Amino acid sequence: MKEIVSKFSEIERRTSDEKGEYDLFALFLREDSSDKWDILVAAEWISKNKQIALKYLSQIIQESFSLSELLNISRIVIIEEDEPALPIIQQAVSCEHSNIEIKDSNFFGLEIKHAYIITSKKRNAEVQRE
């Protein structure tokens, strides 16, 4: 799993350089997930056009992972900017371009067996006004 997390860290850094910073980029293994990871993302650039952002992220992920690695991924989940749980997770875990590991927690009303938080940070007020 360490290699997969490392690849996702590279993807997060690359895509944030190309498109803009993330409010959240994380890997979640839900309790009921059959050992498949969800990729959770939130960013202003994603909210502007979710369909294009999802296609962009999917393409980069497919190019970065082998077929056997891709089989460990369930889906990409776009977290809405107005999701009430987003500031809660950002307050609980604040990081950028990291790999913070969390086990046995509850986020977004879901029981999470395992998580890696790569970026979780509040957007600064100046950026929000633009």
Image (cartoon, rainbow, N blue to C red):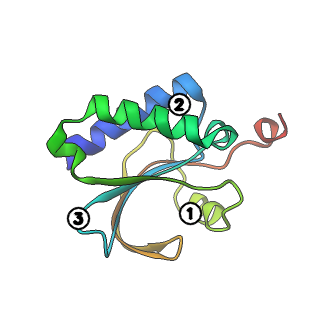
Q: Earlier in the sequence, mark 2 or mark 1?
A: 2
Q: Earlier in the sequence, mark 1 or mark 3?
A: 3
Considering depth in this image, is 11 or 67 the residue closer to the camera?
A: 67
Does 18 sit left or right of 112 as displayed?
right
**Of the residues shown, which amino acid type is indicated by label 1?**
Ile
Residue named by callout 3: 35
Q: Is residue 105 above or below residue 66?
A: below
Q: Is residue 89 above or below residue 46?
A: below
**x, y (%) of residue 20?**
60, 30
**Of the residues shown, which amino acid type is indicated by label 2?**
Ser
Residue at image location 18% in from the left, 36% down from the top: 66
Comparing labels 2 and 1, the label whose residue is closer to the camera:
2
Residue named by callout 2: 16
Residue named by callout 1: 89
Does 36 sit left or right of 23 as displayed?
left
Q: Is residue 114 above or below residue 97?
A: below
**x, y (%) of residue 130?**
83, 33
**Of the residues shown, which amino acid type is indicated by label 3?**
Asp
Q: Earlier in the sequence, mark 3 or mark 2?
A: 2
